[in-house]
Amino acid sequence: MAITNDSSKATAAGKAGAPSLDTSKLSFSYSGACAAGSPPPTVTVTTTYSGQSLTGFFGSSLTVTGKGAMQCNG
């Protein structure tokens, strides 16, 4: 997203980077946009995955959320 400012491409790249996950349970949300400015803006992505627990220790399912940010144009 920080390179292309295209959420479709960013989502496709995120899903491609997680080949062992069921990508239908993977979601992405974006905040911020890359536009000309000083200082360069930052884009933030929040990724959420809901899946089955392997051990059942924390219940039958788990939801994991991660958040990252990057300055636009890398």
Image (cartoon, rainbow, N blue to C red):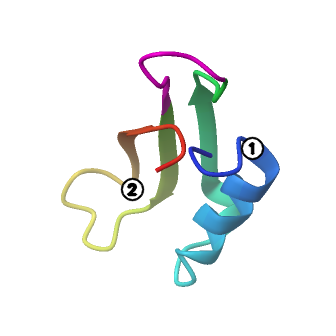
Q: Residue at left 54%, top 45%?
A: 73
Q: Is residue 59 left or right of residue 30?
A: left
Q: Look at the image and say whether residue 11 sits in the magenta stretch.
A: no
* Residue closest to the far left: 57
Q: Residue at left 58%, top 21%?
A: 32
Q: Is residue 16 above or below residue 63?
A: below
Q: Is residue 22 above or below residue 35?
A: below
Identify the secondary structure beneath mark 1.
Answer: helix
Q: Residue at left 46%, top 50%?
A: 74
Q: Is residue 56 above or below residue 59?
A: below
Location of mark 2 (residue):
60
| Residue 31: percent from left, percent from top | 58, 23
Q: Which amino acid does the dot numbered 2 rest on?
A: Ser
- Dominant secondary structure of the magenta stretch? loop
Of residues 48 and 11, which is closer to you in this image? 11
Location of mark 1 (residue):
7
Q: Residue at left 25%, top 71%?
A: 55
| Residue 65: percent from left, percent from top | 39, 42
Q: Is residue 57 left or right of residue 56?
A: left
Which residues fall within the magenta stretch? 36-43
